[in-house]
Amino acid sequence: MLDPVDPAVLDPVALDAADPLAAVVDRFEPGDDLVAYLDGNSLGRPLRATVDALPEFVRTQWAGRLIRGWDEGWLSQGERLGDRIGAACLGAASGQTVVADSTTVLIFKLLRAAIAARRDRDGIRDELVIVADEFPTDRFIVERLASDHGLTVRWVDAPHDGGITPALAAEAVSERTIAALFSGVAYRSAWLADIAAVTGVVQSQGALAVWDCSHAVGSVPLSLDHWGVDYAVGCSYKYLNGGPGAPAWAYVAARHQGALRNPIPGWLGAAEPFSMTSGFEPAPGIRRLVSGTPPIVGMVPIADMVTEIEAAGIEAVRAKSVALTEYAIALVDALIPDAVVASPRDAARRGGHITVDHPKARRAVDRLWVEGVIPDFRHPSGVRIGLSPLSTSFAEVERGVRALAAALA
Ligand SMILES: *Cc1c(COP(=O)(O)O)cnc(C)c1O
């Protein structure tokens, strides 16, 4: 823990000088009026490499190869990039991760597949479990699937500055549970779940553990294989810097793939996409989760960022992430004493952002955005400070929190 009263520890120049990843910050596009970007967990900044890679793709791949590109690699691009994300960020052996669709659509596909897998087998299972203040998209899908399939939603009440724990999961999950959908890192509080332990609780009742890792992937090391996770999904425009609307990834543990029932059976998830035969025969392996044509252009920036994470190593990314959030909390404590840190103070239970509650949050964030200081507002009174480890310097955190203190004063 940093000592918030020690000015030497609060010196951002010293912290940047000691940061082994400091040089990576300059690999990102600077932006026009950026003073402090505190929202890399909502939309990551573009790499300079991506500024070149996109037109290069258009010239050499799209214009250069045209329809031949599909045979020359585009068709399997979602699986190959999925394997790289799996190795660099997820602790997933190859053949279990695919890039396709949006996070929202993939959550729907996985939960619908979970219902098919568990309900049809056991008959008695008729409940889905989710945290009550989970991200809206996740809640909406759970509620819709429950109403369409005659299921009950079991809402878990987690603390405002916390999230799912093994004890809370044990209260909610039973022999009636089909699946539990939880966040690896909670989008508001940044609570970092004990994914292994919670997964064990869910599976001990015969239910499937489905993890939304949108706010974890690329900032927190994951070990999905080792933890025995069933299905997982995550966003690629947050800490994977894929750009607005970048396609998401999904993970299905190898043991489940043979029985996985994709509720949107498109031609590119079929065993033989170009045979044009009647009847749907799913592809073996993770490709059966694919529905239609893969979003190839949207994968270009993701690949650039995965290259950076591969080079840095996810453990080093996490070490910087912890140092950044420790520093931000120390600054908030020192400069904004009337704010409430609504995130875990224990770094081991905290992801890559912090949320600070303050009654003037809404107006302060509006004002800061005009000044080029960009945190996020989270209803009703949260200022969310997201510190993307590879693109954020300690000096930037200091500028940002000082500006926030002034705006809240
Ligand atoms: C960002 C995020 C999403 C986003 O879903 P989209 O389909 O990309 O809009 C979903 N769930 C969680 C928990 C998120 O943090």
Image (cartoon, rainbow, N blue to C red):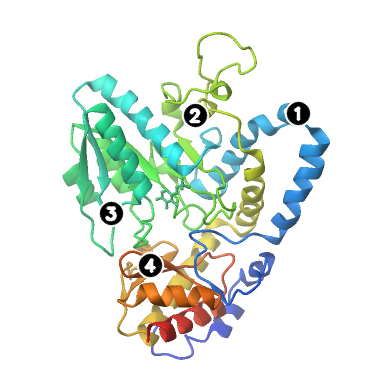
Going from the N terminus, do you reach mark 4 or mark 3 first? 3
User: Residue 158 falls in which quadrant of the image?
Assistant: bottom left
Q: Are marks 2 and 4 in contact (CB under 8 Å)?
A: no
Q: Secondary structure at mark 3?
A: loop
Residue 1 appears in the rendering: no
State the residue position of label 4: 347
**What mark, if any, has residue 67 been given in the picture?**
1
Whole-percent x, y for residue 142 in the image: 30, 39
Classify residue 47 as left or right of residue 37. right
Whole-percent x, y for residue 76 in the image: 64, 31
Residue at the image point whose x is 34% and y is 30% from the top? 114
Going from the N terminus, do you reach mark 2 or mark 3 first? 3
Classify residue 407 as left or right of residue 60. left
Q: Are marks 2 and 3 in contact (CB under 8 Å)?
A: no
Instruction: Identify which amino acid the numbered label 4 is placed on.
Output: Ala
Going from the N terminus, do you reach mark 4 or mark 1 first? 1
Instruction: Identify which amino acid the numbered label 1 is placed on.
Output: Ile
**Is 103 situated above or below 254?**
below
State the residue position of label 2: 289
Q: Secondary structure at mark 4?
A: helix
**What mark, if any, has residue 133 been given in the picture?**
3
Quadrant where the image shows the N terminus: bottom left
Instruction: Identify which amino acid the numbered label 2 is placed on.
Output: Leu
